[in-house]
Amino acid sequence: MPGETDLAHLLRTMKPERQAGTYVFCTVASLEGLALTDCLGTFQEREGFTLILPQPTADRLHLPYSYVAAWITLTVHSALEAVGLTAAVAQALARGGVSCNVVAAYYHDHLFVPAHAADTALHLLQHLTEANG
């Protein structure tokens, strides 16, 4: 089933949901010796591989990180070709002083915000939903 593309509908029904735990972004030169099942996400860049990991996993693997995040899922099934959702969410969070790293997966958009700002981020996202209801 294709995802939703109507921005107004996406904003009204995005239903942000915080996932348990804290998550970190790490970088490694090679995936050798790593179990990809330990990773929430990976991305290959020219400089190396970026890993998104649960913080305890990064600690167990002795991988350095500098950013500890909360993970918020927008539970609406957004289409990859939808226009404006990321911008609207990023703008709402930015107005509230919350940085955000967005990962768009097939079914949902996932937001990584500073762990200490998770409650603020959820409040701002709820306000965005209500403002579009």
Image (cartoon, rainbow, N blue to C red):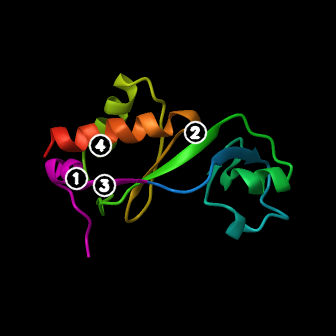
Q: Position of residue 74 (x, y in %)?
A: 36, 54
- Between the residue at mark 3 and the residue at mark 2, the CA separation in whole angstroms equals 19 Å
Q: Earlier in the sequence, mark 4 or mark 2?
A: 2
* The N terminus: image quadrant: bottom left
- Whether residues under marks 3 and 4 lie with C-beta atoms below 8 angstroms apart, the answer is no
Which quadrant of the structure image shows residue 88?
Answer: top left
* Sequence-earlier tag: 1 or 4: 1
Q: Nearer the viewer, residue 127 or 41?
A: 127
State left or right for residue 84 relative to residue 95. left
Q: Secondary structure at mark 2?
A: helix
Q: Is residue 76 visible?
A: yes
| Numbered disc in front, either 1 or 4 | 4
Identify the secondary structure beneath mark 3.
loop
Question: On the image, numbered disc 1 is attached to which residue?
Answer: 10
- Of labels 3 and 2, earlier in sequence is 3
From what the image shows, is residue 104 above or below residue 24? below
72 vs 1: above or below:
above
Residue wearing tag 2: 115
Q: Which mark is residue 126?
A: 4
Residue 39 image point, x, y percent:
67, 61
Q: Amino acid at mark 2?
A: Ala
From mark 3 to mark 1, how far is it between C-alphas? 9 Å
